[in-house]
Amino acid sequence: MRARFAVSALALGMAAGSTVAQAQIAKVTLYGQLNVDLEFVKGTTCPSAIAFASTNCPTGSDLSAQTSNPTVTRISSNSSRIGVRGTEYLGRGQVAIFQLESHVQADTGNSSSNGLASRETFVGLQGDWGTVKAGKFLTPYDDIVPIFGNAPTLTTSILSTAALWAQGPLPKSQGGFDARLGNSIRYETPLLGGFSAELQYSTRDSSGNTSGFNGGDNGDHASEVRHANVLSAGAFYSSGPLDIGLAYEYNHQVRSAEQNDHAFSVAAAYDIGSLVANPGTRVAGIYERLNYGTLAGSLTRNFWGFSATVPVGGGSFYAFWGRAGNGGGSAPDGTGVGMVTRGPDTSCDQFEVSYTYALSLRTLLYAGYVRLNNAANAFYTFNINEYAITTGAKPSGIVFGMTHFF
C-alpha cells in the first residue's frame, strides 16, 4: 500500500511538473484599439430615411419638399475593440491558439448590441503544416482588402473602401460578401516562397441565432434546415514590391432557398518607390464580379478601382477611385439584391483622399474626404457608419480622427 502511494505521488508530481513547464511557455496578451473621429457628413435624405432603403420618402407629395441635404456633425467609433489572445506550446512544434475579441462603442460607451466575443473569436492549432481554427471571424474574401484598400486609416470609418466593393455595408443574409461569420472553421497554409492560401467553411446553423433577416451573419433554424452554408477561399502572393490576391466566395441558399450567390475578386499592388525616388510609394488595382441568383434570373455587377499610397512629410497620403457598374444579368430591370439593382443608371463612383500621420508607434492621426456619386437609380452608402440616403443621392464626408493601440 505504501509503495503504491509512493508511485502515485511520484506520478502526480511529474504531471504537475509537466503542467508547470508547459505553463511557463504559454503566453496571454491583452490588446485593443480605440479609433474615434469627428465627421461632417452631407447627403440627400428625408425625415423617415432608413439605411439601404431606396423608397423611404413619403409618397403622394413633392419629393423635393420631403428631402433635405443637411450637413450632419457626428462623433463615431470605428472598429474600436478590446481582446485577449494567447498561445500555448504543446510540444513537437505544435501550438494551441485562442482569441476573444469584443467590439467597443468608444463614442457612446453603449455596447449592448455588440457584446463579448462580438468580433474575431476562435480557438485553434498551429504548426509547420499551417493553422486551423474554429469560431467567428472574417472570411478569406475580406483578406484581399489591404492590397488595394485604405490601410493607412485601417480600412474603417466612412473612408472604408468597401462601401461599393462586396456590398460591404450589408450582412451576409442581404447579399453582402464582406462579413464576419460565426459557426466557421478555417485552414491557412504556411507561407511557401511568398505564396499562401486560405479556406473557410461556415455553416448557417441556429447555434448562434441572431436577430435580423435570415439570421444575419450567423444563421438561424430556417437556414439550418435548408443546409445553407458559405465557402470562401483566397490565394495570395507577396514578395518584394509585389502583392497579388485572388478571392472567391460562394453562398449556398444563404438569402433564401434555391438562390445561390458567388463573388470573385482579384487585386494587385506594386511598390514603385524605387522608380520615383520615394520608397513606400504604392499603386494598386482591384476588380470584382458579383453574381446573385434570383427567382427571376441572374443579377450581376462589376466593380473596379485604383489606389495610390505616397509617403509625404512623415505620413502617408492615400487616394482611391472605385466604380460599381450598372446591374446586369438575365433578371428583368428593377430586380435588386441589397444595393445592386438591374438596369440603367444603377452605377456609383467612390472618390477618396486621406492623410495619416503617426505620432508614435501606438498613436495615429488622420484626416480624409470621401464622396459617393450615385447614378439616378442607385443608393449606395458608406460601409462603416452608414448614412441613410435617397435614390440618386451623393453623400460625402470630411473626417478628422485619432487611433490609439494598446
Image (cartoon, rainbow, N blue to C red):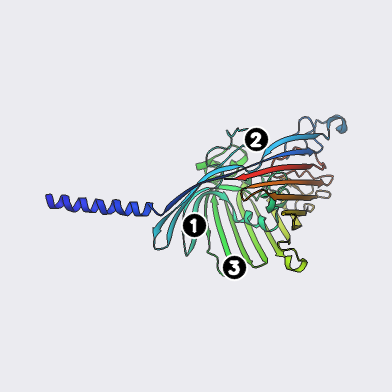
Circle nearer the N terminus (3, 1): 1
Q: CA separation, marks 3 and 1?
A: 20 Å
Q: Secondary structure at mark 3?
A: loop
- Horizontal side of 28 relative to 214 (left or right) equals left
Residue 2 visible in image: yes
Residue found 66% across the figure and 64% down from its top: 243
Q: Position of residue 101 (x, y in %)?
A: 54, 44
Label drawn at residue 194: 3
Residue found 83% across the figure and 35% down from its top: 69
Q: CA separation, marks 3 and 2?
A: 40 Å
Residue at which label 1 appears = 132
Mark 3 crowdedness (10 Å alpha carbons): few <14, some 14-19, many ≥20: few
Point out the image quarter for the C terminus. Answer: top right
Mark 3 or mark 1: which is in front? 3
Residue at which label 2 appears = 107
> Which residue type carries mark 1?
Val
Residue found 78% across the figure and 50% down from its top: 352
- Horizontal side of 70 relative to 176 (left or right) equals right
Circle nearer the N terminus (1, 2): 2
Q: Secondary structure at mark 1?
A: strand
Which one is nearer the viewer's eye here, 396 or 89? 89
**Up-down relation of residue 69 to residue 238 (above or below):** above
> Which residue type carries mark 2?
Asp
